[in-house]
Amino acid sequence: MKPRVLHIDPYHIDLELLKQAAEVIHNRGLVAFPTETVYGLGANALDPKAVTGIFDAKKRPLDDPLIVHIADVKDLYRLAEDVPPEAEKLVSCFWPGPLTVVLKKTELVPDLVTTGLETVAIRMPSCAIARKFIEVAGVPIAAPSANLFGRPSPTTARHVIDDLDGRIDIVLDGGSTEIGIESTVVEFMGGRVILLRPGGIDLERIRAIVGDVEMPSRPAARGKSPGEYPQHYSPKARVIVVESGFHQAKRTLSTAAEMVSKGHRVGILARQEHEDLYREFDVKILGPAKDARTCASRLFHLLREFDTEEVDVIVAEAIPEKALGLAVMNRLRKAAGPEPTTNFHPASI
Ligand code: AMP
Ligand code: MG
């Protein structure tokens, strides 16, 4: 069955529509809803049967834990215990907002939500529609991104329907999401703060509050944050990342030309500064390299656009890994998967 699409004006939220969505939640159904990061696919986090529906609809592996969304900080203490001072500081600075904290779970949280882990990931979104929806539902909402597993996260209701048509009950359409990439996920261990996934709150801002933040190496991160797969967020096309630095545009051009010569339909995902150099190609502009916020807000949307054009190779220019650029490059590298990136190589110029 097609999902019901309910249009919600973020400036005049119609509570009657949210009540319809809340009813679906109480009947163990699935509601896709906008947040400031990406669209989430929500179910009652306290009801394992409802949560099963999320894994089924997304085809998400059962070892990839969900983030629980709340509308009131009080709920943090119902869902988690032994909350360390570092977590309290971060939550008081960045909630509501795109920060997820991983904490020791209480009995209230079903094992399915955490896929058997002793810890639970919790976030309070800043998006008014998301918060009102959770409030009206009256229960915490477990919600991963509302896409089929492995695909780029959805930043519009259209993206959700493209992936999940016939698999969910309602989509709350609140327009394009503001940030466009997922939340930052952090964990705490004996006074240490560990970054499990870069995201909408940048590392520099977290460091300003709690001092050092550790970044585990990739294999360790996989063990600690089970949802961090080496390949993820991928369009259907193969993605090749062209690293920043000397002659980046020239390397992008030669990679694109090589792929065309092999018979591929090629798209270039470029920094705005290089736009004019790629006129002969199907080029989409991520944003000015120094404006990581714009790049983040456009990334998933553009990867999906290339898919609709049936491009089969995307040659993507790296941007600096500063501020939100760290999260943008994390997603782009995962979209590329184990594909080698093209570095500066004198012989190639
Ligand atoms: P998604 O909701 O699809 O954006 O992904 C949720 C992210 O949170 C994944 O990267 C998970 O690995 C991570 N996560 C959720 N729960 C936990 C947990 N208990 N411990 C560590 N990471 C978690
Ligand atoms: Mg996801």
Image: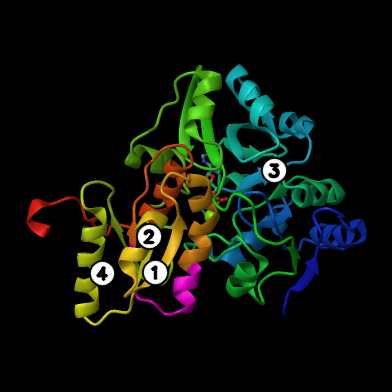
Spatial CA span between label 2 and label 1: 7 Å
Neighbor class of circle 4 (other Cα within 10 Å; few <14, some 14-19, many 20+) is: many
Q: Secondary structure at mark 4?
A: helix
Q: Secondary structure at mark 1?
A: strand
Which of the colour schemes (rainbow, by chain, secondary structure, one colour) is used?
rainbow
Single out the mark in the foreground, 1 or 3: 1
Determine contact: label 2, label 1, CB under 8 Å. Answer: yes
Spatial CA span between label 3 and label 4: 39 Å
Residue 84 placement: quadrant: top right
The residue located at (19%, 72%) in the rendering is 258
Give the residue pinned by disc 4.
Answer: 256
Q: Which mark is residue 125?
A: 3
Q: On the rendering, which quadrant does ligand 1 occupy? A: top right
Q: Is residue 195 above or below residue 231?
A: above
Residue type for callout 2: Ala
Residue type for callout 1: Val
The residue located at (52%, 42%) in the rendering is 199
Residues shaded magenta: 304-315
The residue located at (32%, 68%) in the rendering is 278
Where the C terminus falls, by quadrant? bottom left
Neighbor class of circle 3 (other Cα within 10 Å; few <14, some 14-19, many 20+) is: many
